[in-house]
Image (cartoon, rainbow, N blue to C red):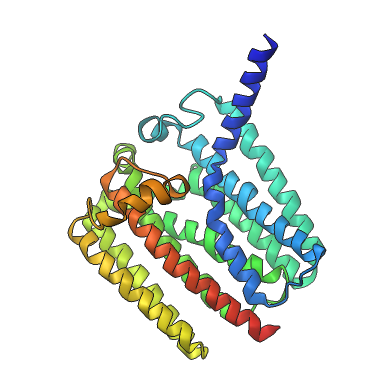
């Protein structure tokens, strides 16, 4: 009996952790790292490393985990169709246990974020706490009624861009310095890139969205047009990024970004022509190389998006971090 009880306890802990969806925590790390690098003010001291770890803990396991837990709780009926193996629809966690899950993680985020803000102090502390609280509010109303922003792509995609990209970039910056003007541009670029990616990520739940009355772009205009809209946003982001690099005097970075834009456009053409099986040459990378990190899908359009995401994210994030490092070096 003790062994059975122990196994049950371990499985319950695993279910609670799965509700926080650890894979999604890494999504905020590049923006946090970019903001920190662009500040040019972090020192190689134990104090600054602990601050950085606390910031990653705040926006990763706590804030992102909170958003995932709340989403699962309020999407129970949709998940019975789209993802029946998730902790709540599978019966591994009750709805009451799910409420305890996101309530505790919410309280943890508020305590840690407020502590960090007080430690920094001044306007920087206010910006950090305000960013953290606004991100938590957006994460809640994204999934919770009556607003439930995710029901309409016109609200859901900007909400994700704001919570996952914009405020995280600002928070990484203010942790160590005043906001650098260039950081506002980079945060904005990440905001629009996140919008484009979340538009395509909705492919995975198109069946459940259609049945549940969710107005995702793929439900409203179809797969092919959804790819077209997302690709236009992505290409504009890379174009503005290249212009910024040139105006900042980062000539080498400008050519790297231009090259990344060309590679992306070459990949986008076959995906637009055939939304279900475009760039199949990337399938091996998804299945064996990045599959455990970015997931897999039975929906063909979503699987095509995953293949594209591997290339796009490497190109965009590497150039973003390069830009952040160059900006930070100017302020050292």
Judge from the rendering whether residue 49 lies leftward or rightward of residue 188; answer left or right.
right
Q: In the figure, 117 relative to 294: above or below?
A: below
Instruction: Look at 21% across and 62% down and name the residue there.
Output: 270
Side of 323 relative to 82 (left or right):
right
Establish if 237 lies above or below 290: below
Q: Nearer the viewer, residue 137 or 259?
A: 259
Residue 34 picture quarter: bottom right
Task: Give the position of the N terminus as an image quadrant.
Answer: top right
Name the one closer to the observer, 12 or 258. Answer: 258
Q: Position of residue 321 (x, y in %)?
A: 54, 72
Q: Is residue 329 above or below residue 71?
A: below
- The residue depicted at 69 percent of the width and 67 percent of the height is 127
Give residue 329's quadrant in the image: bottom right
Q: Is residue 215 visible?
A: no
Quadrant of image for the C terminus: bottom right
Q: Residue at x 52, y 55 (%)?
A: 27
Find residue 200 and report its horizontal and vertical position in percent: 34, 55
Q: Residue at x 41, y 78 (%)?
A: 257
Q: Position of residue 222 (x, y in %)?
A: 23, 52
Q: Residue 248 versus residue 229: which sits nearer the camera?
A: 248
Residue 232 in percent (x, y) is at 31, 69
311 over 244 or under it: above or below: above
278 left or right of 240 in image = left
State whether residue 173 appears in this view. yes
| Badge count | 0
User: What is the residue that sits farthest to the top in this orientation?
Assistant: 1
């Amino acid at each position: 009996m003790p062994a059975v009880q122990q196994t049950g306890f371990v499985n319950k802990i695993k279910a609670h952790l799965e509700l926080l969806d650890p894979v999604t925590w890494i999504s905020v790390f590049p923006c946090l790292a970019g903001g920190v690098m662009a500040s040019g003010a972090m020192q190689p001291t134990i104090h600054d490393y602990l601050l950085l770890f606390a910031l990653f803990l705040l926006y990763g396991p706590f804030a992102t985990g909170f958003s995932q837990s709340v989403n699962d709780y309020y999407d129970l009926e949709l998940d019975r169709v789209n993802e029946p193996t998730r902790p709540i629809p599978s019966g591994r966690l009750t709805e009451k246990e799910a409420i305890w899950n996101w309530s505790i993680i919410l309280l943890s985020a508020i305590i840690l974020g407020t502590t960090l803000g007080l430690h920094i102090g001044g306007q920087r502390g206010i910006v950090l706490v305000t960013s953290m609280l606004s991100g938590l509010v957006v994460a809640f109303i994204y999934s919770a009624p009556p607003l439930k922003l995710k029901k309409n792509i016109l609200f859901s995609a900007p909400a994700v861009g704001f919570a996952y990209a914009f405020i995280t970039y600002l928070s990484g910056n203010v942790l160590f310095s005043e906001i650098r003007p260039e950081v506002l541009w980079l945060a904005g670029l990440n905001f629009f890139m996140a919008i484009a990616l979340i538009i395509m990520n909705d492919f995975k739940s198109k069946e459940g969205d259609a049945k549940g009355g969710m107005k995702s772009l793929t439900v409203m205009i179809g797969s092919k047009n959804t790819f077209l809209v997302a690709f236009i946003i992505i290409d504009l982001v890379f174009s503005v990024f290249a212009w910024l690099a040139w105006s900042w005097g980062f000539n080498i970075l400008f050519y790297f970004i231009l090259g990344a834009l060309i590679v992306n456009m070459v990949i986008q053409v076959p995906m637009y022509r055939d939304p279900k099986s475009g760039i199949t040459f990337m399938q091996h990378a998804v299945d064996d190389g990045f599959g455990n990190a970015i997931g897999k899908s039975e929906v063909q359009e979503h699987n095509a998006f995953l293949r594209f995401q591997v290339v796009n994210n490497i190109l965009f994030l590497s150039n973003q971090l390069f830009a952040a490092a160059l900006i930070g070096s100017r302020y050292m």
